Image: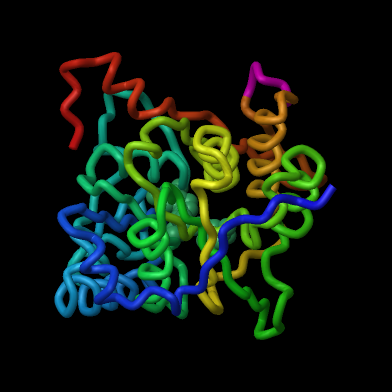
Amino acid sequence: MPSPAVRSFNHREFAVDRLVEAKGDQRISMVLPAKNEAPTIGPIISAVRRHLMRKQPLIDEVVVIDDGSTDGTPGRAAGAGARVVAAGDIAPELGPGSGKGNAMWKSLLVTKGDIVLWCDADVRNFRPCFVTGLLGPLLVEDDVQFVKGFYERPLDGVRGQGGRVTELVARPLISLFFPHLAMFAQPLAGEYAGRRELLEQVPFVQGYGVDIGLLIDVIERVGLSSVAQVDLGVRVHRNRTLEELGPQATAVLHTALARAGLPARPESLPVLARPWREPEIVEVRERPPVAQLRAGDARANFA
Ligand SMILES: Nc1nc2c(ncn2[C@@H]2O[C@H](COP(=O)(O)OP(=O)(O)O)[C@@H](O)[C@H]2O)c(=O)[nH]1
Ligand SMILES: [Mg+2]
């Protein structure tokens, strides 16, 4: 059976002045989850502030959620004009957490946007069109609630060789358990945006499972027809070693299997065991939908 099509766009279809007009009085927050991204975070923030805040009023706030960076990331980010918040300082009463997805979930508690956009902070060739591309369908097209980025990802300059976890873990999993997602070109992309109302209805996996988890859960909630993907061109980021990718692959696998009804040893966090290496605990705990928290605690005053 052919996989259903996903509404697909190119960032070139969305000129910034058209988006500013379409935005009206909606507020837009851009969030960068970051841990030790000093070389790249400053230029990303500077570009957004210059092109999408000062020249054109598209973005209302840029927020970095830092997690104990030791390389000066918070200083670089603040110096470039972002608001920097330590993940651990956000709602500590909700219990400890860790990882990229935890930082993203917490970003919902400290931002005000009607639309929230996330972007990885290790992107080396960031351009403002990453942001305008992701916002385009949300602002201009009918009934789009979530937009996922996709791109060409070279590895060491060679086309099409990047995205090893995508090709060897995410795509096989999608084909086996979620074939309706097969047409997403980069299911693990960290560049995506959505309406707050929707984002507050879904749980967040705390670690690297967050990207695939959100894609599955958002589509389960609103259907494929309310989701789009946008071609952002070429994206270059820090490429990790195979050794580093093991825990990420484990998180993706665990997250997808749990959503396919096949939870792996639910009584404990998964441990990636490899010969002659310390076993590594993989963060796959989930934060509940923010809407549930707000409903459960009328006193909560997050943002
Ligand atoms: N706040 C926070 N950000 C994180 C954490 N782990 C990763 N990130 C950020 O999430 C983004 C994507 O992470 P990265 O390691 O590049 O993922 P990859 O591209 O899939 O290898 C980057 O901006 C990281 O700095 C974390 O524990 N806390
Ligand atoms: Mg990266």
Residue at position x 40%, y 65% in the image: 37
Residue 279 rendering spot, x and y as whole percentages: 70, 39
Residue at position x 62%, y 75% in the image: 152
Magenta region, mostly helix, strand or loop? loop
Q: Which residues are magenta?
A: 264-268
> How many discs appear?
0
Residue 250 rendering spot, x and y as whole percentages: 69, 42
Residue 240 rendering spot, x and y as whole percentages: 62, 65
Q: Is residue 201 above or below residue 249?
A: above
Quadrant of residue 180 in the image? top right
Is 285 in the magenta?
no
Residue at position x 23%, y 63% in the image: 59
- What is the quadrant of the C terminus in the image? top left
In this rendering, position of residue 27 left or right of residue 132: left
Is 265 in the magenta?
yes
- Residue 34 visible to an observer of this rendering: no
Quadrant of residue 64 in the image? bottom left
